[in-house]
Image (cartoon, helix red, strand yellow):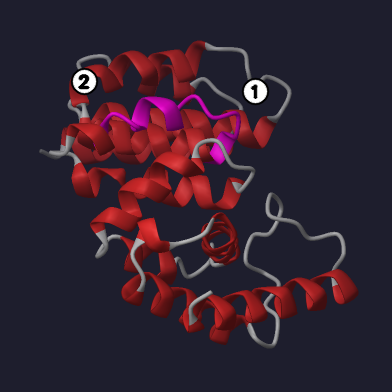
């Protein structure tokens, strides 16, 4: 065990102990960054130090899990995820491994950042795995990234997101998925945008209608 590993795991264990004592209801899937423990900053700093000093292939599975834990907890500022972008080996390996983990709040952070390496096929193609992850926010972030990485396929996915019944009954998820669809269709300059703007304007969803009207106004002004 190297000195960076020991320090990181000590802080992660301390943070988990604090959360268990004071906020046992918080886990890696429902932590939206609203709960910050007293050693949070030190834990994230140590995770950043670790990835800068230690190579991925020199890391144990426990160390990698600790890094994932820190990424998941740092889902408000996303500082650690941004630092990973500077470390190609770490980013590529963690982005691939994260797909199979339970760290939901880490998954969407990777999905958002895949366009950074859109010219690297191995990383870019991961977007098709992320967009299938069974988490609404991860799918939404993945759809927007897809529009940047592979705009030619984004329209198909966007329309599927709009038409599918997956989030029927969940008004928040359905509304925000459809809002993202509009922005993606606008981003890729789809000729189907006007149709879905009209569909959105017929909706009972307030924010969906507002976004449709704003996009329509912006495009009519061009």
Question: To which quarter of the image does residue 165 belong?
Answer: top right
Which residue is located at x 58 percent, y 64 percent?
66
Front residue of 222/78: it is 78
Q: Please state the horizontal and vertical placement of residue 137, each as a whole percent of the image.
A: 54, 40
Front residue of 178/113: it is 113
- Other-residue count near label 2 (Cα within 10 Å), few / some / many at <14 / 14–19 / ≥20: some
Look at the image and say whether residue 114 sits in the magenta stretch: no
Q: Is residue 2 above or below residue 106?
A: below
Front residue of 155/57: it is 57
Which residue matches tag 1?
167
Q: Please state the horizontal and vertical placement of residue 217, each as a whole percent of the image.
A: 26, 38
Q: Secondary structure at mark 1?
A: loop
Tell me the distance, in whole angstroms, between the alpha carbons under discs 2 and 1. Answer: 24 Å
- Quarter of the rendering occupied by the C terminus: top left
Q: Is residue 107 above or below residue 199?
A: below
Which residue matches tag 2?
190
Which of the marked residues, 2 or 1, is nearer the chain's N terminus?
1
- Other-residue count near label 1 (Cα within 10 Å), few / some / many at <14 / 14–19 / ≥20: some
């Amino acid at each position: 065990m190297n000195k960076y590993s020991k320090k990181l795991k000590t802080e992660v264990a301390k943070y988990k102990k604090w959360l268990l004592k004071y906020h046992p209801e918080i886990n890696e899937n429902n932590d939206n960054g609203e709960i910050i423990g007293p050693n949070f900053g030190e834990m994230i700093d140590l995770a950043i130090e670790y990835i800068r000093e230690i190579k991925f292939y020199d890391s144990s599975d426990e160390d990698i899990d600790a890094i994932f834990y820190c990424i998941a907890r740092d889902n408000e500022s996303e500082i650690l995820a941004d630092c990973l972008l500077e470390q190609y080996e770490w980013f590529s390996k963690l982005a691939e491994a994260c797909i199979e983990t339970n760290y939901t709040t880490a998954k969407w952070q990777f999905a958002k950042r895949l366009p950074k390496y859109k010219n690297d096929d191995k990383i870019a193609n991961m977007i098709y795995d992320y967009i299938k992850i069974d988490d609404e926010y991860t799918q939404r972030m993945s759809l927007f990234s897809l529009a940047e990485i592979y705009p030619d396929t984004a329209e198909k996915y966007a329309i599927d997101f709009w038409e599918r019944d997956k989030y029927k009954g969940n008004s928040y998820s359905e509304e925000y998925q459809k809002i993202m669809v509009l922005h993606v269709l606008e981003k890729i300059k789809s000729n189907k945008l006007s149709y879905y703007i009209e569909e959105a304007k017929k909706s009972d969803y307030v924010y969906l209608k507002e976004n449709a009207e704003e996009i329509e106004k912006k495009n009519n002004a061009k």
